[in-house]
Image (tube, helix red, strand yellow):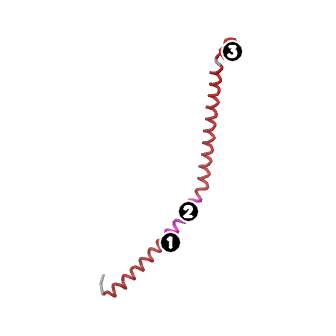
Amino acid sequence: MTQLKEWARDNSTLLYFLVAQFIAIGAGAASVLAYMVKLETRVETMEVRGAAYTVARMDDMKLSIARLEQNIEKNEDQIKLIRDVMTRRLNINP
C-alpha cells in the first residue's frame, strides 16, 4: 500500500492529467448526447408543425396553378379571336 502511495505521489501529474482527460471525455460525450437529443426534438417538432404547413402550401400552389391555367386558356381564346379577326380582314385562309 505504501508503494502505491509513493508511486501516486511521484506520478501525481500523470494522474491529474488522466483524471482531467476522463472528465473532458465525459463532458464531450454529455455534450454530444445533449446535442443529439436537442436535434431529435427539433426534427420531431418540424415534422409535426411542418406537415400541416406543407399541406397548406401545397393547396395554395394548386390553387395558383389552377388560376394560371385559367388565365392561359383565356389568353389562348383571345389570341384565337385576334387571329380570326386579322385573317378575315386580310382575306387569308389559315
The amino acid type found where label 3 is placed reads: Lys
For label 3, the residue is 5
- Which label was assigned to residue 33? none
State the residue at coordinates (55%, 66%). 60
Question: At 56% across and 59% down in the image, what residue appears?
Answer: 54
Whether residue 63 appears in magenta in the rendering, the answer is yes
Q: Residue 3: x percent and y percent?
A: 67, 11
Residue type marked 1: Arg
- Residue occupied by mark 2: 57
Q: Determine whether the residue tagged by mark 3 lies in a helix, strand or loop.
A: helix
- Label 2: state its secondary structure: helix
Whole-percent x, y for residue 58 in the image: 53, 62
Q: Nearer the viewer, residue 20 or 39?
A: 20
Q: Quadrant of residue 28?
A: top right
Q: Residues within 10 Å of mark 3 (few under 14, many from 20)?
A: few
What is the CA distance from the residue labelled 1 to the residue labelled 2? 15 Å
**Residue on which disc 1 sits:** 67
